[in-house]
């Protein structure tokens, strides 16, 4: 299995809109982090589709190693 690229070692703080569906980048190659831009084509990765439960700020994983994808769980602290 391929290993995702680490896009950043800090989470992205993003205001998401309730009920809207987003596509989180799982490969780490997207130029529109933390969202997918199609850069995974030709890899085994697929973006993760999710819908925001509330309109608020979320912390989205950019290290691609969270166990709560697409949300940050602090795993980036162990990558240093």
Image (tube, rainbow, N blue to C red):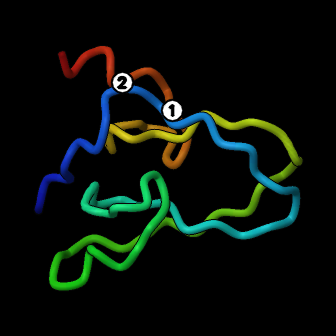
Please give the residue where the numbered disc 2 appears in the rendered image.
Answer: 75
Residue 79 x %, y %: 20, 22
Question: Which quarter of the figure is the C terminus placed in?
Answer: top left
Residues tagged 1 and 2 counted as in contact (Cβ below 8 A):
yes
Q: Residue at x 79, y 67 (%)?
A: 20
Residue 19 x %, y %: 86, 65
Question: Which quarter of the figure is the N terminus placed in?
Answer: bottom left
Residue 38 x %, y %: 35, 79
- Residue 71's image quarter? top right
- Residue extending farthest to the front is 31
Report the Cα–Cα distance between label 1 and label 2.
7 Å
Q: Residue at x 76, y 51 (%)?
A: 16
Left or right? Give the position of 46 relative to 70.
left
Residue 4's label in the rendered image is none
Q: Residues within 10 Å of mark 1 (few under 14, many from 20)?
A: many
> Looking at the image, how many numbered discs can be counted on the residues?
2
**Whether residue 41 is situated above or below residue 17 in the rendered picture:** below
Q: Residue at x 65, y 42 (%)?
A: 14
Left or right? Give the position of 79 relative to 75.
left
Where disc 1 sits, the SS reads: loop
- Residue 43's image quarter? bottom left
- Residue 60's image quarter? top right
Q: Residue at x 55, y 68 (%)?
A: 23
Please give the residue where the numbered disc 1 appears in the rendered image.
Answer: 72
Q: Residues within 10 Å of mark 2 (few under 14, many from 20)?
A: some
Residue 9 x %, y %: 31, 28
Where disc 2 sits, the SS reads: helix
Left or right? Give the position of 54 relative to 79.
right
């Amino acid at each position: 299995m391929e290993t995702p690229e680490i896009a950043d070692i800090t989470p992205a703080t993003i205001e998401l809109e309730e009920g809207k569906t987003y596509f989180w980048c799982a490969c780490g190659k997207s130029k529109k982090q933390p969202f997918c831009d199609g850069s995974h084509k030709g890899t085994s990765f697929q973006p993760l589709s999710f819908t925001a439960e509330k309109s608020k700020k979320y912390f989205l994983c950019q290290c691609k190693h969270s166990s709560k994808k697409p949300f940050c769980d602090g795993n980036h602290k162990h990558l240093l």
